[in-house]
Image (tube, rainbow, N blue to C red):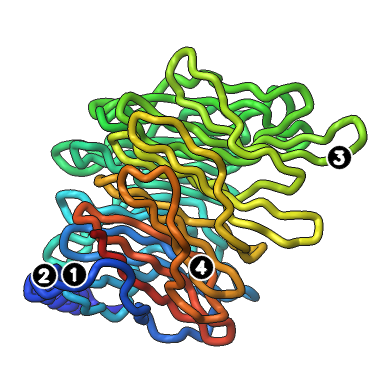
Amino acid sequence: MRSHTAVAALFGACLLAAVAGASAGAANAAGWGRPFRLTPPYTTDLTPVGVTVGRNAAATAFSTRDQDHPAVSRAFLAIRAAGGSVSPPFAVPGAQEVLDLAYDRTGLRLLTAGSETGKTCCSTVQTLSLLHNGRFGRASRLAGNLTGLTIGTLTTLPSGRLLATIATDRGVWVAQSRPEDGFGPTRRLTSSGAMPWTVATTADGRGQTMVAWTSTAGQQGEVAPDQIVTATGSEQSAPGRARTVVKAGKGHQIDEIGLGPGPRGATAGWTESWFDRRGAYHSNVLVSDMGAGSRPRTLSATSGAAAGLELAGDARGDQVVAWKSCARSGACTAFAAVRPSGGRFGSAQGLGSIDPGQSPAATVASSGDALVGWIASGHVYVAERRPGAGRLGAAKTVSTTSYASGLALAFGASGTALAAWTQGTLAPDVVGAVFRGR
């Protein structure tokens, strides 16, 4: 592991390059630049990447993992300056995984997870900051004694504060950052017997936050989840009391959920599936605003299996929801639907084939510009929705590699987006490409 001094030197050089290259970057043509390596090749497997874009830099997080010895995993960061320079990847201290990452006023904030030496991740979740001077701050533990698969998100509020959401198959917890730095107390949102299957978090333009998860009235594992439960909060207080907001029809189950911000609340999207009396399988994608009196709307009703749902939006109400639908043959198609600010979601738009093991990625800029990306035959494709348009434009080929997987997309405040993915099988590395809006 590199010393803090070495990390600071690398990070400082990256920021200096950002300042020096800002005018040159602004002069570059709009659209996608050429792919570039964020890391060298590795001899181990790599986890899917996470990305975030700040004002002067973008960060990519990933972990190395030995499939034969899953406890042997380490989390890494790679920083790309606005001017184009990329720091060599450096280890994140005390972390086996980076669950999520986001920029705030202190620098780059990480939500990390780890376990005791020799044990598979994850039993503990903490926050860690990479400060503007390139040094790591002191880690702050948010949750411990966790078991099973652990997921987590960092949601940015309009004030710049962050809401951390942590979920396992045993519960959902939240903690919110404070103006004076650090995070407040961690709050459990679910009962001790709850076993949520999927969790999503968002913050709207007023700073109102929402966490949503699936729930069931029976024993999880024996009875599939058929309800969506939410808890709401604000800039001043983390989400608290939970209530059921959606209940599926008899015999239906809710497989996935997503949340997106709007000007006056959150919008939820989810997949709902069931078998009819003849044993035929059905799978729908639905959306609904979470305000009082809102009714769900079906965006897609197919005989295939809908999965990989992602919903993204901006504070004005521009939203995009993306998913894939897979037929019995195993062939899968990527879909998306767009919602302009103040309007309704348009009809589902087929984007093209998508590799069965991959899910689409989506992101929306503050201007309303939206990107939906997917991987087909190992190639990376992205379609753009220009501000005000009701549909996505034609797909652009971002990378012609045949070995891409785990695509992630994120817009920054300046209208610049970063796409990142793992590439290769025997010696995988992390590759990125930059998008500049018009």
Q: Quadrant of residue 371?
A: bottom left
Question: Nearer the N terminus, badge 1 or badge 4?
Answer: 4
Residue type (three-letter) at the residue carrying disc 2: Ala
State the mark number for residue 22. 2
Viewer-nearest of discs 4 and 3: 3
Residues tagged 2 and 4 counted as in contact (Cβ below 8 A): no
Determine the residue positioned at 28% across, 43% down: 156
Question: Nearer the N terminus, badge 2 or badge 1?
Answer: 2
> CA separation, marks 4 and 3?
35 Å
- Residue 268 in the image: x percent, y percent? 49, 32
> CA separation, marks 1 and 3?
52 Å
> CA separation, marks 2 and 4?
31 Å
State the mark number for residue 280. 3
Whether 8 is drawn above or below 424: the answer is: above
Nearest to the observer: residue 386 or residue 78? 386
Task: Describe the element under mark 3 as helix, strand or loop.
Answer: loop
Residues tagged 2 and 3 counted as in contact (Cβ below 8 A): no
Task: Describe the element under mark 4 as helix, strand or loop.
Answer: loop
Question: Can you identify the residue that label 4 sits on?
Answer: 47
Question: Can you identify the residue that label 1 sits on?
Answer: 82
Viewer-nearest of discs 2 and 4: 2
Using the rendered image of the protein, determine whether residue 96 is visible from the camera's viewpoint. no
- Is residue 161 found left or right of 224 in the rendered image? left
> CA separation, marks 2 and 3?
56 Å
Task: Describe the element under mark 2 as helix, strand or loop.
Answer: helix
Residues tagged 2 and 1 counted as in contact (Cβ below 8 A): yes
